[in-house]
Amino acid sequence: MKKRLITAESARSESERLTALEVRRDYERRREERRATEAQWTLNACFLAGRQFAEIGPLLSVTDIPSEYPWQERQVYNHIAPIIETRLAKLAAVRPVMSVRPASSSDGDLKTANAASKILSAVTARLETDNIVSRATMWSELTGSAFYKVTWSGGKNGDVSITTVSPYEIYPDSQSAAGMDEVRSLIHARAVPVGEINAAYGVNVRPEDVELAIPERAAFAAMPDLRVTKREDCAVLIERYERPSAKKPDGELIIVAGERVLFSGALPYRNGTDGSRTFPFVKQDALIMPGSFFGTSMIERAIPIQRAYNAVKNRKHEFMNRICCGVLAVEDGAVDEEELTEGGLRPGSVLVYRQGSQAPRMLDQGNVPAIFSAEESKLEEEFNVITGVSDIMRSSSVPINASSGTAIQLLIDQDDTRLTITSDLIRAAVRDIAKMTLRLYKQFASDTRLTRCVGEDGEVELVEWKGSDIGECDVVYDTVAETAASRSGKQSRLLELLRLGLLTGDDGRLDTATRHKLLAAFGYGNWETAEEVRGLHEQKADKENLAAADGDIEASEIDDHDVHERSHIRYMLSGDFAAAAEKDAGLETRMLGHIRSHRAMKKLTERANAVASDEQTFA
């Protein structure tokens, strides 16, 4: 029996080793297929950092271009860095707030959607998703693509975790897949210290020489090769995700480090549509490249123009140096050439030349050709055309010929138009993150939770919920066109709508909610607290709707009767009320009587206020 047990253990160990080797071979194959794309990413990083005399060599390694002559000017006039900085500054305004659209108009679905929206708002604040999106946008602007990993940590009482993943760590099974939906298998490989692997999985893994791609550090250090082999205390942690199929209906996740299989099983998250299992990754592109899984960066388009611009500026400066320093023609043997070459013609120096020979003379270099300046201007215009980042965006200056505010705003809108595609891709990625977040809560948050959140009216409230309260709701954008209008532009439009009377009610007056939102748009949302009281009245009315099933409910003198009446009528028109009324024949009578009591109290209050006003007038 003991011998058979040892044999079984040996067989399992051998099977595990073969599985680990198969996953590593798959990783190496995908890595080799991606080498050309990765070389382009590294070249982009070089040009962004200012190492612009670099090229992709025949072995797909990025190396420096040697100078043809020692005297050649090789200065860098970096236009790519300010272009990317400007794009990042503009895209920083694209931070859509997610809201949940209810599945139907029933009161229950409305409350579920409202709770889900508040959960998303709380998660956004807790995880500081603005910073996460900013890091991902920097990667997408550099390489063309960035990824978010949406996972669950901490077991039943845990929470959602959202991290930014570099494209250097992502390996799809097909480089030509149009998007995440067409990828059947995905590998996430990264260097992790062996101590962290042991703490997470309880397995000791041997350290290995890890080849790390660190484009920013390598570019600034001007190293001959951008692949740095370091970190002797690390091992490559490989996670291979496979989409569900007929053979594997729940998909498969295998985690490997060294020759050890750390995990093997079904995909852990039901983060797809209708509870299906899929990859925990969301892809964000800067610009979509047809026929390629990874997107493309604006840097890639600007590299040829940057090369030409550097060449023109350097040749122009070389010409100016020849004019300023001059080129000296000397008869052979007339002067000490070595001394003249080393010291040149210093001002006030005495030049001694051989008697009978011709005196040294300066060659006429003429003037700098006008074609240099013309070509320089054309290349600067090409930067604007190719990248879509104009002088208005880069220098924050207005053209001299634009004198009216309308013309200036039209120019700004035209500049923002080129960023619309990238902005929409960021919004789509944030929407997918929000969907995955709600689905993970639905799967794992089985216990009741309390979430502190701030409503759109500015009040802070505690929401009690659990995973089963989250339905298959549709996540939509709550704000649109962040880049199409600045804060001042939105404020101007709001004032124009207010002047046109489009924000007022039938009586020509602003209601409390609209007034509060207007103040919030101008940065004074906390000045009013009326909405906080209104929210409390709505909560009290909702409790009365539920209490009506147990017996009569009475109106109170402190109630806001308009708010209560609207809440009760909305409840009576919902499907939930119809279902409850079928079981309780007296429910409709009690609710109608309660609404009549609110109307009666409202009339009494209005009559008392009118009498008090008349008495004040006569007094």
Image (spheres, rainbow, N blue to C red):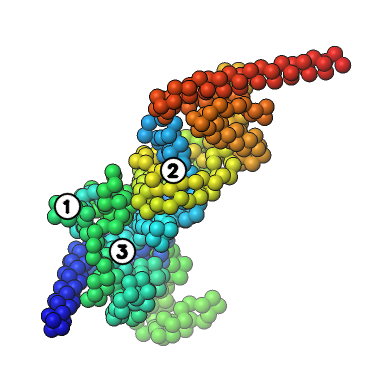
- Which of the pair 113/123 is nearer the observer? 113
Q: What residue appears at the point 40 percent right and 52 percent down from the top-left corner? A: 445
Residue hosting label 1: 245
The disc placed on residue 116 is 2
Q: Position of residue 250 (x, y in %)?
A: 22, 54
Q: What residue appears at the point 62 percent right and 38 percent down from the top-left corner? A: 532
- Which of the pair 132/457 is nearer the observer? 457
- Which of the pair 413/473 is nearer the observer? 473
Can residue 75 be seen here? The reply is yes
* Dot 1 or dot 3, earlier in sequence: 3
Q: Which is closer to the viewer, label 2 or label 3?
A: 2
The amino acid type found where label 2 is placed reads Ala
From what the image shows, is residue 98 above or below residue 150? above
**Total residue callouts:** 3
* Dot 2 or dot 3, earlier in sequence: 2
Q: Position of residue 36 (x, y in %)?
A: 23, 63
Rounded to the nearest angstrom, the CA distance separating label 1 from label 3 is 27 Å
Please tell me how crowded label 2 is: few (under 14), some (14-19), or many (20+) other residues with Cα within 10 Å.
Answer: many
Quadrant location of the N terminus in the rendered image:
bottom left
The amino acid type found where label 1 is placed reads Ser
* Dot 1 or dot 2, earlier in sequence: 2
Please tell me how crowded label 3 is: few (under 14), some (14-19), or many (20+) other residues with Cα within 10 Å.
Answer: many
Residue hosting label 3: 168
